[in-house]
Every structure is written in C-alpha cells, then in structure tokens.
Image (cartoon, helix red, strand yellow):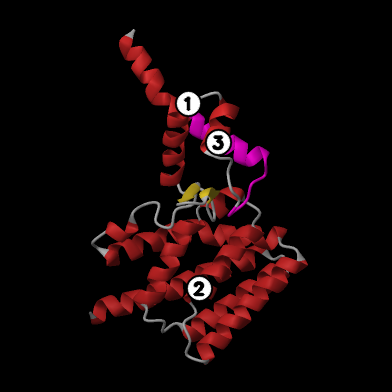
Amino acid sequence: MLESLQNEKKLLPERVAEQIITLIKDKELKEGDKLPNEFEMAKQLHVGRGTIREAVKILVSRHVLEIKRGCGTFVCQNPGKIDDPLGFAFVSDKKKLAYDLYELRMMIEPNMAALAAEKADEEGVAELQKIADEIKESIAKGQDYLEKDIQFHALISQLSQNSVVSTIIPVLQTGISFFIHMTNKSLMRETIETHQLLVNAIADHDSQAAKKAMEQHLKYNKEKMDEMMKEG
C-alpha cells in the first residue's frame, strides 16, 4: 500500500506536466508567451505549488518551458525540440558519425523531397528559390552558408507537409553541419547545382526528379568525404 502511494506521488508531477502541455495547447500559447504563476496553476490544476514546481522542472528539461528569474515561466522557442536530442556532441568518432548520418539522410531526404514536389505550393517554391539564391550569393562572396543550407533543407521538410519529418529536422540539421564542415565547404559548385535541380523539380511537381536531385546532392557529399578520408 505504501509503495503504491509512493508511486502515485512520483507520477503526479509527470501527470501535471502533461496537463500543463494541454493548457499551453488549449490557450494556443506560442514561443515567448508567459504561463500563469505558480499559485494560479496550482489552483487551476487542483494540486500543490510544490507539484507545479516539479512539473515545470520536467518541462524545462524537455525544452518546453524556460524560467526567467524575476519574470516568470515562458514557452520555449520550438518547444520540445532539443538541439542535440541524440547526444551527437558526445560521440568521439566523428567520421563514423558522419557516414552514419549520411545513411540516415539517404533513407529520409530523397523521399522527403519527392513528397515536397507533390505537395508544395507556389509560395513555398518561391521561398525555396530565394534561399537557394542566397546560398549561391554567399558562396560567391566566400561567406558562411551553413545556416542558409539548414534553412533550405528545413523548408523542403515543411513543403513535404509531413509533421513527423519536420520534427526530426534537428537531427538532419546536425548531419548537414557535419557534412559542410567535413568537406571544408568545398562542394560549392555541386551545392549550387543540386539545390537548383531540387528547386526546379519541386516547382514542376516532379517527385522522381526531386528524389534523384536529393540523392545526387547527398552523393556529392559522400564522395568528397571519401576523398578526404583517403588523403587523411
């Protein structure tokens, strides 16, 4: 009986954390919006203030909420999405990680591009072309284009209109940054070429061409990595 009560007490903050998430959804709170104070939430959810504090800690650890001292508790940017959810920063063999990420991207991104070609609207295609042009301009000027490259791939995931793909984009973004750094940003011509092929295929709603363009884009990266491994 005592063990059952202890388990019930242990689970309560978790249940309240879920209730707070429901509260955020019901009130349509967005990034930067402030939650009610501890007292108000405790009253609304019929629990003690200590339980609210524990539930908030859980949601802070999950990157749903952030506490600003003296100001209150707020909804995080991209709630629930953590920059390094699989702990890639702690993997010691970065070369193997890069190849493993290549395999993951090859499984996901070509099909993601094919879906984008089927579902993208004119506004989305125009935005994709704009980012491709900005990357081309950055390359011409010798500027860092990592953030723009990440935006390009993230937008393709959004154009696929698959919510699951969009949620795993932080993992893919890690892969993109690895590829760019490992190839010393030397795939400039290939990047411009395959980005434009992707834009054209998506604009034409040609799913097979989009899939092939993404496969080629990723293969260029792997070929360059292979060259660097041989040299190193």
Name the amino acid type tagged 1: Gly
The location of residue 215, given as percent across then percent down, is 51, 67
Q: Residue at x 55, y 36 (%)?
A: 20
Q: Residue at x 49, y 28 (%)?
A: 15
Q: Which of label 3 and label 1 is nearer to you?
A: 1
| Separation of marks 3 and 1 at Cα, in angstroms | 14 Å
| Separation of marks 1 and 2 at Cα, in angstroms | 44 Å
Number of disc labels: 3
Camera-side residue of 88 and 49: 49
Mark 1 lies on residue:
48
The location of residue 143, given as percent across then percent down, is 48, 86
Tell me, for residue 147, which label it has, or none.
2
Camera-side residue of 122 and 76: 76
Mark 3 lies on residue:
20
Question: Answer yes or no: do the residues labelled 1 and 2 have beta carbons within 8 Å?
Answer: no
> Element type at marker 2?
helix
- Crowd band around label 3 with a 10 angstrom C-alpha radius: few (<14), some (14–19), many (20+): some
The location of residue 44, given as percent across then percent down, is 60, 28
Please say whether residue 19 is visible from this viewpoint.
Answer: no
Q: Quadrant of residue 194?
A: bottom right
Q: Residue at x 44, y 45 (%)?
A: 60
131 w.r.t. 83: above or below: below
